[in-house]
Amino acid sequence: MVGIIIACAGLFIIVISFYARSENPVRSAFAGMGSGFAVLIAAWLSLPFFDIFLQLNAVHIFMSLTLGPPGVVLATVFQLIYN
């Protein structure tokens, strides 16, 4: 469990630093949120074909909105490891 928190915190720092260095940080943040949610929905619809079931709950939605597409990849990797 500690590994999950450390991985999310590290990824959060990387994403925030990326947003801060961009020319328009607010626009970049909203683009990351939108693309993260879109990737979450696409993964939720397509991954059951590969016997990987990513739940659509508040934690995964929060991860996709704050971390963007890397958050969805991280949630999928954790789903593969722990199930």
Image: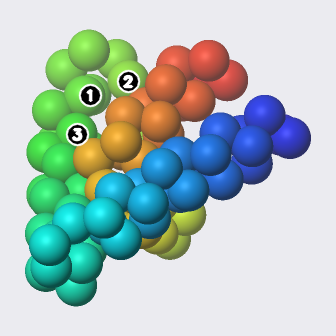
Residue at horizontal 57%, vertical 30%?
Answer: 78
Image location (x, y in percent) of residue 22: 21, 66
Point out the frontmost of discs 3 and 2: 3
Q: In which quarter of the image is residue 67?
A: bottom left
Instruction: Using the image, tell me which numbered label, if any, was put on residue 68.
Output: none
- Mark 1–mark 2 CB contact (< 8 Å): yes
**Pointer 1 residue:** 48
Residue at horizontal 52%, vertical 19%?
Answer: 80
**Pointer 2 residue:** 52
Vertical side of 19 occupied by 48: above or below: above
Q: Label 3 crowding class (10 Å Cα cut-off): few <14, some 14-19, many 20+? A: some
Name the residue nearer the viewer: 82 or 19.
19
Image location (x, y in percent) of residue 14: 48, 50
Tell me the element at label 2: loop
Q: Is residue 18 left or right of residue 81?
A: left
Q: Earlier in the sequence, mark 3 or mark 1?
A: 3
Name the residue nearer the viewer: 19 or 72.
19
Q: Quadrant of residue 51?
A: top left
Tell me the element at label 1: helix
Disc 3 to disc 1, C-alpha distance: 9 Å
Name the residue nearer the viewer: 68 or 25.
25
